[in-house]
Image (cartoon, rainbow, N blue to C red):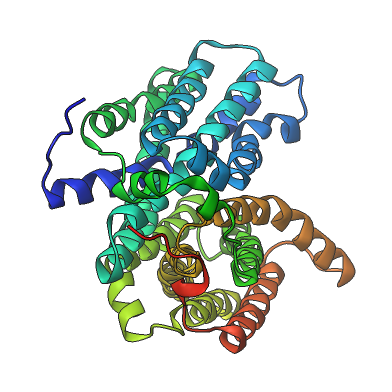
């Protein structure tokens, strides 16, 4: 089959657009109130599985992504991942059985568990150095945030106009991403070269322990950020600083900060090649602390944009750190970061509930304080343990 020749800029577009649906499972969150009303016979906690189940299921393929990427071509994984995403996303439109809808959301989660690490993996396959850093930051922060805003907004508009079922039609949108990438995105030469060199030598390469420690840190990072997302609206409304609209605006500002950070990640990493990650975690904590102490809505907005911006550096920072630590010839380990992110999102509510019970505190400002302190501690640990990445820890495959 003839290989299509594409420009370098078009290749950059193809690899970053894969991140568009990374956090698209949020459509269900924007129409959750309507779904709960549609199933009054079920406890709301059960109905909320429609929103949370994809995050749980995406952990499974993400954990095995390294083996999947060794076994199958990237284009095959892309086709399977996006197909599962679209099928699992759209089919609830035509269903009235809650358990079937939840099952479809699980299929969507399987797709996300493949495409999310893949969206970072293909960048590291095609690009290196500052170009790679910029594209990882731009994809995982900026494009993913634009996608999240799009899916939540359009899903809500369709649900309001035609009924909650129609909100799921938003998942038809990535069909064009599937079509354009399958038509034009080439199979990475790096993988082809490793296959040509033989798989036996690459299988002997072990991942350094640092990768597992960074992925473990990602679990705590994701869990601690959960404290902001779930408590911001409570703080704003309980303290009479604003209404539900202003609470939604604060979270939007947080997302906007993350979006902007994607443009600057490459430059920040270049200026602070070893400390960018602990610094990003520390500044995320500062954003949480500002929100905790804030007496006004404006201060909450300021804390939100600071925290969101720092998260927009921290998230691609973890992906980049793990990519740099992965030895040449070893299985891709970015799936571990995606799994860590999913595990942190699931464990976060339970962790905060335990701490609140221990200190006899309620939701609201207290979880923000816990988030800030936890992030400061995580930043300190990462700052102490940080080392300059070294890709020469594995076997070099001769060309």
Any part of residue 149 in sight: no
Viewer-proximal residue among 229 and 319: 319
Q: Give the quadrant of the C terminus.
A: bottom left
Q: Position of residue 22 (x, y in %)?
A: 44, 44
Mark count: 0
Q: Up-down: is 295 above or below 90? A: below
- Image quadrant holding the N terminus, namely top left
Q: Position of residue 63 (x, y in %)?
A: 62, 47
Would you say 351 lies left or right of 188 here? right
| Residue placed furthest toward the bottom | 384
Report whether residue 379 is seen: yes
112 relative position to 364: left or right: left
Instruction: Name the residue located 41 percent from the left edge and 58 percent from the top edge.
Output: 255
The image quadrant of residue 160 is: top left
* 306, above or below 340, in the image: below
The residue depicted at 27 percent of the width and 66 percent of the height is: 263
Q: Nearer the viewer, residue 77 or 87?
A: 77
In which image quadrant can residue 136 be found?
Answer: bottom left
- Toward the viewer: 361 or 148? 148
Residue ID at (29%, 70%): 129
Residue 255 horizontal side relative to residue 9, left or right: right
């Amino acid at each position: 089959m003839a290989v299509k020749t594409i420009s370098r800029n078009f290749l950059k577009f193809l690899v970053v657009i894969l991140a568009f649906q990374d956090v698209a499972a949020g459509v269900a969150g924007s129409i959750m109130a309507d779904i709960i009303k549609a199933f009054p016979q079920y406890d709301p906690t059960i109905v909320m599985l429609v929103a949370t189940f994809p995050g749980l299921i995406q952990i499974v393929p993400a954990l095995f992504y390294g083996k999947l990427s060794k076994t199958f071509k990237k284009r095959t994984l892309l086709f399977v991942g996006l197909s599962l995403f679209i099928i699992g996303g759209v089919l609830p439109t035509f269903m009235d059985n809650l358990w079937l809808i939840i099952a479809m959301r699980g299929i969507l989660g399987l797709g996300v568990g493949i495409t999310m690490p893949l969206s970072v993996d293909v960048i590291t396959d095609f690009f290196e150095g500052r170009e790679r850093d910029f594209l990882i930051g731009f994809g995982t922060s900026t494009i993913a945030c634009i996608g999240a805003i799009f899916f939540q907004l359009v899903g809500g508009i369709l649900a309001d106009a035609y009924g909650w079922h129609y909100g799921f039609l938003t998942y038809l949108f990535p069909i064009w991403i599937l079509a354009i990438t399958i038509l034009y995105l080439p199979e990475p030469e790096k993988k082809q070269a490793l296959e040509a060199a033989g798989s036996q030598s690459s299988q002997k390469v072990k991942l350094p322990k640092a990768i597992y420690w960074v992925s473990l840190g990602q679990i705590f990072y994701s869990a601690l950020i959960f404290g902001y997302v779930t408590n911001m609206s409570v703080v704003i409304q309980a303290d009479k600083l604003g209404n539900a609209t202003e609470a939604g605006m604060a979270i939007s500002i947080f997302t906007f900060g993350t979006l902007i950070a994607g443009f600057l990640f490459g430059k920040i990493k270049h200026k602070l090649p070893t400390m960018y990650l602990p610094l990003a975690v520390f500044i995320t904590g500062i954003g949480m602390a500002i929100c905790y102490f804030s007496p006004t809505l404006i201060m909450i907005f300021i804390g939100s944009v600071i925290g969101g911006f720092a998260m927009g550096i921290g998230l691609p920072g973890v992906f980049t750190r793990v990519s740099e630590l992965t030895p040449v010839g070893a299985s891709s380990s970015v799936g571990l970061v995606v799994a860590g992110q999913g595990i942190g999102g699931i464990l976060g509510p339970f962790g905060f509930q335990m701490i609140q019970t221990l200190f006899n505190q309620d939701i609201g400002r207290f979880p923000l304080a816990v988030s800030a302190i936890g992030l400061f501690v995580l930043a300190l640990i990462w700052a102490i343990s940080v080392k300059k990445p070294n890709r020469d820890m594995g076997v070099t495959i001769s060309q």
